[in-house]
Image (spheres, rainbow, N blue to C red):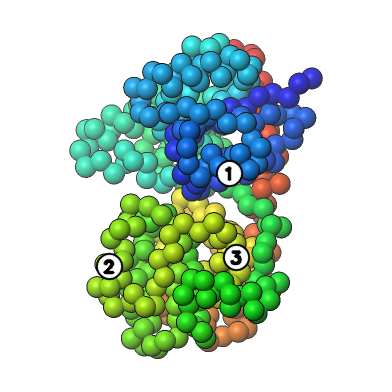
Amino acid sequence: MAPAAVLYVVCDSDLYGTQRNILSAARRLDPARHKPLVASPPRGRFTEALRAERIPHFPVPLANLRDTSSVAALRNIIATENVALVHAHLGISAFLSLAAARLSGNPPVVATRHFIEDRYATISNPALKRLYARIYARMNKRFARVIFVSEAVRSAIELREGALGERGVVIPNGIDILRGPFKEELMPEDSERIRDRFGVPPGRFLVSTLSRLAPEKGLDTLLETAAVLDRALPGRFHFIVAGEGPLRESLPSAAAALNVSASVTLAGYVDNPGELLAASDAFVLCSRAEPFGIALLEAMAAGLPCVAAGAGGPLEIISDNDSGLFFAPGDAQGLAERLLDIEADLSLRERLVRGARARVVNFDERSLSFLLASVYDEAIALGKRR
């Protein structure tokens, strides 16, 4: 029997958590059971990553909810590739995927919800917010399954849109825990070379974060933490922020206003974040309500002691004082204190790294791919019975 074609649809071709989730899923599917295909906008780092993984890509604009040309393109892909299941990520993709499926024999559509606060949840007009929630609730009834990347995401969405019962399932994001590089395997001269490339002064305790540069990521807290530590221990700590996003232009002036420009490197997009992690001494995640935390998992796997804001997905990843440390979201003083503890206490660092390595095994993409494949098979079977 030929493998069932699974069409992933995503309306953004940047390479952030959503797209990395798709890459992880697609490369781990059993080729004897499922054949991955991807439809997304034509250009971007995600497109390049798909090419590198040799995953078939179909360029579709997926521009907005009224993009009828993209509905037609998806319909054509479903027909010509004999698609057995559509897996939609992000709101526009889900809406257009449902429309295309309806016009092409109704293959089952699975949706993954990635955010605690969808864009509509931030609308200030209560009536408009309720309208969007009702629209999403109606869409949820048409999905064969709705996957949430964390219990935090499920709780927030079901509070707004209603309980999904057995239709909803939590499957966390996964990573390749064997990929490396690992901190303990990096030669000192290689670590220094990487640090030099990012302009880190010799002898600094290097704290890194991988993050989309957006308001919800709490990067103001990171800058304030750098200021607290600079005042307490000048020249002891250095921070690297790797990523791009809407705050890219304003962060340098924010750092300058706090007088931390010399202590914080805004690195932009980094081609090999694994190298940066391996050359770092600690990792922080400052998001006020992170839906999950792929970068946190990668830092744990790389062998770094990690500190995260105690909200959202990280609460499902870290056990406090065992596999990482928490601080209250937005509390720069609290984050500074956790970093001081880690910097000063080698035994604490070693204990957190051991705990993290034991914990991160639960998020290996190889194991999680079996859960996803089961959801696909269930959805396809449901579709055949309709």
Mark 1 lies on a secondary structure that is helix
Could you tell me which quadrant the C terminus lies in? Answer: top right
The residue at the point 36 percent across, 63 percent down is 219
Res 254 label: 2
Residue 156 versus residue 107 in the image, above or below:
below
Alpha-carbon distance for marks 1 and 3? 18 Å
The x, y position of residue 356, in whole percent, is 63, 66
Which residue is disc 3 drawn over? 275
The residue at the point 38 percent across, 88 percent down is 234
Residue 124 versus residue 63 in the image, above or below:
below
Could you tell me which quadrant the N terminus lies in? Answer: top right
Res 49 label: 1
Residue type highlighted by circle 2: Ala
Q: Nearer the viewer, mark 2 or mark 1?
A: 1
Residue type highlighted by circle 3: Glu
Q: Earlier in the sequence, mark 3 or mark 2?
A: 2
Label 2, residues with CA under 10 Å away: few <14, some 14-19, many ≥20? some
Label 1, residues with CA under 10 Å away: few <14, some 14-19, many ≥20? some
Q: Quadrant of residue 316?
A: bottom right
**Res. 165 visible in picture:** no
Mark 3 lies on a secondary structure that is helix
Q: Earlier in the sequence, mark 1 or mark 3?
A: 1
Mark 2 lies on a secondary structure that is helix
Is there a contact, CB below 8 Å, between mark 2 and mark 1?
Answer: no
Foreground: 227 or 168? Answer: 227
